[in-house]
Amino acid sequence: AQKITQTQPGMFVQEKEAVTLDCTYDTSDQSYGLFWYKQPSSGEMIFLIYQGSYDEQNATEGRYSLNFQKARKSANLVISASQLGDSAMYFCAMREGTPLLRSNYKLTFGKGTLLTVNP
Amino acid sequence: DTEVTQTPKHLVMGMTNKKSLKCEQHMGHRAMYWYKQKAKKPPELMFVYSYEKLSINESVPSRFSPECPNSSLLNLHLHALQPEDSALYLCASSLDVSRTHKPEQYFGAGTRLSVL
């Protein structure tokens, strides 16, 4: 079974509008972390935002916010005021395990959502 | 400054060649990673180094040989590769593999490898 599910292969949004990219996850661990990365066509993976499983408030970084709903196991990325430069592939990723376990090292990525911002 | 530098950006090699990919970071990170990414797929972890020691090898074929000469450098030595090894190879680093505060990994721009 997939641990990270991104159900939207592609999304379109008009410039200056907000967009939500969906991510659901599956884990039995109590301690885990959720990440969003942006990958433009150039290839570099750019870290956007992080949410720890024990964090009580939703993470925000500038125009990015993470809508964390623990009971529903969802960690959706919200991009406000979209810009043309936001066009890219977006990956949701999860790190499981406690600090003492090897599994902590690994990021499991979803399949990604290709976002296109239209002028 | 969150910068991971990878060289070369592009590499074309034959199946009998030996080449190396290089990754460098000066952020004081003690964990470094190699990922392989095929087109239109997510990255797949290959190796993890923690404090210059190999911590994880995700059952990668021996034609890929990682090396961590010091805390800032990570190499990936390539020998006798197959055409299916053509991919984008990404290097990443993080403060510490076990850190829960600021656990994010920072990636380089990658090396696009073509094996002929």
Image (spheres, grey):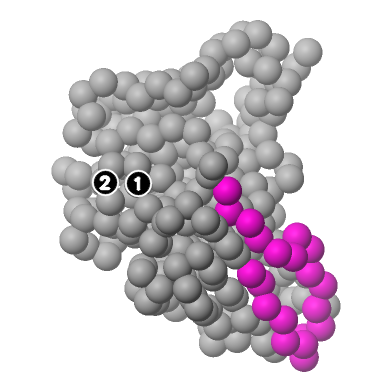
Q: Are marks 1 and 2 in contact (CB under 8 Å)?
A: yes
* Magenta segment main secondary structure: strand
Looking at the picture, how far across and down is residue A67, in whole percent?
37, 21
The magenta span reads: B3-22
Looking at the picture, how far across and down is residue B113, in whole percent?
74, 67
Q: In this view, does A51 lie to the left or right of B87?
A: left
- Callout 1: 10 Å neighbours few (<14), some, many (20+)? many
Cα separation between marks 1 and 2: 5 Å
Whether residue B5 is visible, yes or no, is: yes
Q: Which of A21 and B96 is in front in this view?
A: B96
Name the image quarter holding residue A93: top left
Q: Which of A68 and A52 is in front in this view?
A: A52
Name which residue type carries label 1: Pro
Residue drawn where x is 47% and y is 56% of the image: B93
SS for tag 2? Answer: loop
Up-down relation of residue B11 to residue B77 (above or below): above
* Whether labels 1 and 2 share one chain: yes
Circle 1 residue: B103
Chain under disc 2: B
Circle 2 residue: B100
Looking at the picture, how far across and down is residue B37, in whole percent?
61, 59
Q: Is residue A80 left or right of residue B81?
A: left
